[in-house]
Image: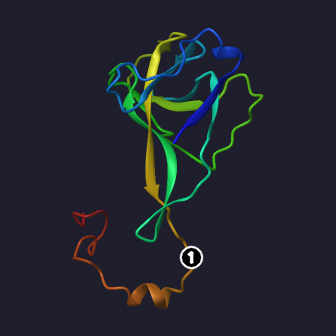
Amino acid sequence: MAILYAKTKLGMDLPDLAAANACDAGFDVRAAARVLLWPYSRTEIPLGFVYRFADETPIIRDGVEYVQTLEVVKKGSGEPWLEPLAIIFDKGYHHALNDPRGIRLIVVNRSPWPHIIRRGRKVAQLVEREVRKVVVRPATLEELEKIPRPDTRGGARLGSAGL
């Protein structure tokens, strides 16, 4: 499986997308612009490239279809305050090829202080992952009530602890 990418105007002078080491499963992505992150706020970081999955062949194993995705697996430079929110770019995600920002990573600054992401700074690592394709269909409440619970979690109120 191959991922084809092209740099946008903002990403022309950034390093090429590639694994940092020969044994790495993913590749580093860098900020294509200087971005100010306000405390506890959500911000888009332009990455300066656009991509497409080169192989359009469906992946089917044991009768189950899988979908190719790019997934954020590592926070930028290990900063605990920088948290990516948009973590999966799937095969069907077709961003505008003429947008100079390229794809954008949505992050949250989890600290009480503003931070600046410098242009060229590593902000995440992406890996290709095959995810089982989800089949969603409408059902009636009666159909849902007929499906037995796997265990007793959530019977009281919220969450698995029943709080």
> Quadrant of residue 109 in the image?
top left
Q: Is residue 116 left or right of residue 102?
A: left
Residue lying at the far right in this picture: please name it: 98
Q: Which residue is mark 1?
A: 137
Q: Please state the horizontal and vertical placement of residue 122, each as a whole percent of the image.
A: 45, 17
Image point (34%, 27%), residue name: 24
Kind of residue at disc 1:
Arg
Q: Please state the horizontal and vertical placement of residue 28, each as a whole percent of the image.
A: 45, 23
Q: Nearer the viewer, residue 161 or 83?
A: 83
Q: Nearer the viewer, residue 42 or 4?
A: 4
Quadrant location, the C terminus = bottom left
Note whether 60 is above or below 126 in the view shown. below
Q: Please state the horizontal and vertical placement of residue 67, each as a whole percent of the image.
A: 51, 55
Image point (56%, 16%), residue name: 35
Q: Please state the horizontal and vertical placement of residue 76, each as a whole percent of the image.
A: 40, 23
Image point (52%, 11%), residue name: 120
Q: Nearer the viewer, residue 157 or 84?
A: 84
Tally of numbered tags:
1
SS class, disc 1: loop
Is residue 109 among what the camera can see?
A: no
Note whether 15 is above or below 137 in the view shown. above
